Amino acid sequence: MVWPVQAPEIFCSSDPGKNQEAQTPLVELRGVSFDYQGVVVLEDVHLTIWPGEWVLVVGPNGGGKTTLLKLILGLLTPTAGEVRLFGQSPGKGRHRVGYMPQHMQFDSLFPVTVMDIVLMGRLGVPSRRPLGWYTRQDRQAAQNALAEVGLTGLEDRPFAALSGGQRQRVLIARALCSQPELLLLDEPTAHVDPQAEGQLMEILQHLHRRMSIVMVSHDLGVVSPQIGSVVCVNRRLVVHPTTELTGEKIRRLYGEDVRMIRHDHRCSPEGHQP
């Protein structure tokens, strides 16, 4: 399956901010800046993410997308400004977040299984001891997470033997294993074929029914009907409803024209057909 993106239409979700005055934002960044070895990565960032939202973060390489996620998690400390997660400091709210990093370094010769990888998501759960054997509850949570990403039956499969799309789903299952309220995904559709990308997007649509999602992507064509806002990051940050993401705004973000590919068409000897 190929996830359909019909340019120039970009879909806007229903308003996730109803009754926002009675809610606590999941994420708040107030005047946040971050420098790395004297180089400004993010500058004066303001961002609020409410319960029920699905937010897509886009921008050029080196623009600060991954840094933004790490600031939300408290893995990095801002040079200036304040980050709040569930109304608390990131360190106190982090256990309520599932995180899938952009890269996972592993030795393909190391005999780690799918279940071993997914169970790592239980290590930060407050209800379990930080050391000791995994419990029956831990393993049940891992089984449930694998079922949600369609990988039941692969528990004992070596991680290195999986396809790229299957590996991405295992890493999403690891993020789900802690039963989070907010899912942060850094490039979940990178390095996978169109069919695997479509499967991942279907999984995320299902997950969005019960949790908020913040997803980084290099692909401007990854727009689900449920994504309500696009966060454009290139040192500074601008939030657009998906209906307002025009070609001119994309050019300003990337500094050049960006080609958009229509996945709902195919080429044939008779010509370009829907």
Image (cartoon, grey):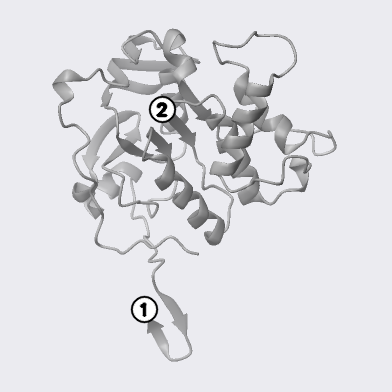
> At label 2, which amino acid type do we have?
Leu
Please identify the quarter of the rendering in which residue 258 is found.
bottom left
Count residues near mark 1 (Cα–Cα under 10 Å), then give few for <14, some for 14-19, many for 20+.
few
Count residues near mark 2 (Cα–Cα under 10 Å), then give few for <14, some for 14-19, many for 20+.
many
- For label 1, the residue is 274
Say if residue 217 shows up in the picture.
no
Please identify the quarter of the rendering in which residue 10 is found.
bottom left
Which is more toward the observer, 262 or 178? 178
Q: Residue at x 27, y 24 (%)?
A: 47
| Image spot of residue 173 (x, y percent) | 58, 36
Q: Is residue 45 left or right of residue 41?
A: left
> At label 1, which amino acid type do we have?
Pro
Q: Secondary structure at mark 2?
A: strand
Quadrant location, the C terminus: bottom left
| Image spot of residue 238 (x, y percent) | 25, 33
- For label 2, the residue is 182
Q: Residue at x 34, y 13 (%)?
A: 83
Say above or below: 33 vs 227: above
Whichever of labels 1 and 2 marks the residue nearer the N terminus, that label is 2
Q: Residue at x 38, y 55 (%)?
A: 221
Q: Is residue 95 left or right of residue 83?
A: right
Say if residue 34 shows up in the picture.
yes
Q: Secondary structure at mark 1?
A: loop
